[in-house]
């Protein structure tokens, strides 16, 4: 998955990554890839919450929320997680 | 008094304390769908108001995340906010009963967000029996913010934080009890509430 924007979320407590184009992720498959990398995942059906250095939420529409206020950390976590999110089916 | 960490609830609490009511604060801890910021903000809100009125406001913190996870997995997302509110009201009522409180209070103002339409308020509060006091119901956002600034809570409320991630993309602005009842049949309401209230922390 590729992302065109990493922006501060509305309440300034996290960064939100916006995917290129409309998409619908296969969340169970994403969960499988994350867990294969040893990342614990909370599966809420409509979103996944990955327990990384910071909590990372992955929505079905491909949006990713990274709970940090540090841009460099958000960029690094996005770089790590984006390949695991993979491409939509 | 239901406390969220936002702008409205400390203003609502201010009005109730100003009238001389003994109040108990209840916060539904929505992690992992938020971050730690609501807890920090509420603690600071209460500190400001306790200093102002010279009396303690006990704070109950109840874990709401597990309930949210169950609702997300098992119910229609469209009415997620109404279902969430119904659980919050029920949990608050249980705390009120435990404490001998005679009413519930909130910082709701009409029409600000999806959960605060008259239709959704009615559906949400039909889950409880105690009367509900809404000191801000007719105020607009600007009026509430003006009071918040004057009592020193605005600067706390507007610190950075994470919005509730459990809010659906298109939350229902209208709901009815039949529809909501059907959704709640998919979960064990009493078990969720028992678990939530059993794990309450008093601060």
Image: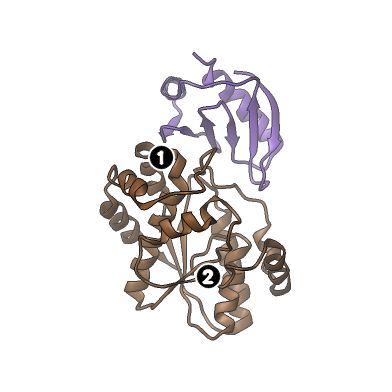
Q: Which residue is mark 1?
A: B72
Q: Mark 2 vs mark 1: give the one in front.
A: 2
> Please, is residue B60 above or below residue A63 in the view?
below
Q: Where on the picture, by quarter, is residue B18? A: bottom right
Q: Secondary structure at mark 1?
A: helix
Does the rendering let one see residue B53? Answer: yes
Q: Position of residue B161 (x, y in %)?
A: 62, 50
Q: Secondary structure at mark 2?
A: loop
Which of B144/B148 is in front? B144
Quarter of the image with the N terminus of chain A in it: top right
Chain A colour in the picture: purple
Q: Where on the picture, by quarter, is residue B141? A: bottom right
- Position of B148 with respect to A31 (left or right) is right
Q: Position of residue A62 (x, y in %)?
A: 56, 26
Tell me the chain of label 1.
B
- Position of A33 with respect to B50 (left or right) is left
- Sooner in the amino-acid sequence: mark 2 or mark 1: 1
Does the rendering let one see residue B200? Answer: no
Q: Position of residue B74 (x, y in %)?
A: 34, 38
């Amino acid at each position: 998955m590729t992302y065109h924007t990493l922006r501060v979320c509305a309440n300034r407590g996290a960064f939100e990554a916006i995917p290129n184009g409309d998409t619908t992720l296969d969340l169970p498959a994403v969960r499988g890839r994350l867990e294969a990398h040893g990342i614990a995942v909370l599966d809420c059906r409509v979103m996944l919450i990955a327990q990384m250095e910071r909590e990372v939420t992955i929505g079905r529409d491909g949006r990713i929320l990274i709970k940090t206020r540090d841009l460099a950390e958000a960029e690094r976590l996005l770089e790590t997680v984006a390949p695991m999110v993979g491409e939509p089916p | 008094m239901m406390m969220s960490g936002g702008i409205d609830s400390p203003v609502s609490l201010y009005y109730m304390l100003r009238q001389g009511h003994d109040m108990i604060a209840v916060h539904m801890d929505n992690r992992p769908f938020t971050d730690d910021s609501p807890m920090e903000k509420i603690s600071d809100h209460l500190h400001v108001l306790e200093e102002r009125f010279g009396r303690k406001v006990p704070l109950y913190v109840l874990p709401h995340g597990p309930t949210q996870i169950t609702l997300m997995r098992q119910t229609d997302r469209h009415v997620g906010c109404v279902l969430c509110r119904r659980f919050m009201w029920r949990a608050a009522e249980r705390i009120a009963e435990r404490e001998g409180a005679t009413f519930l209070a909130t910082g709701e103002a009409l029409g600000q967000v999806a959960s605060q339409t008259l239709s959704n308020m009615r559906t949400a509060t039909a889950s409880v029996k105690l009367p509900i006091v809404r000191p801000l119901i007719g105020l607009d956002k600007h009026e509430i913010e003006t009071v918040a600034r004057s009592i020193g809570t605005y600067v706390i409320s507007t610190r950075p934080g994470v919005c509730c991630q459990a809010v659906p993309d298109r939350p229902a602005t209208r709901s009815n009890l039949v529809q909501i009842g059907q959704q709640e049949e998919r979960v064990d309401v009493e078990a969720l509430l028992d678990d939530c209230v059993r794990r309450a922390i008093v601060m």
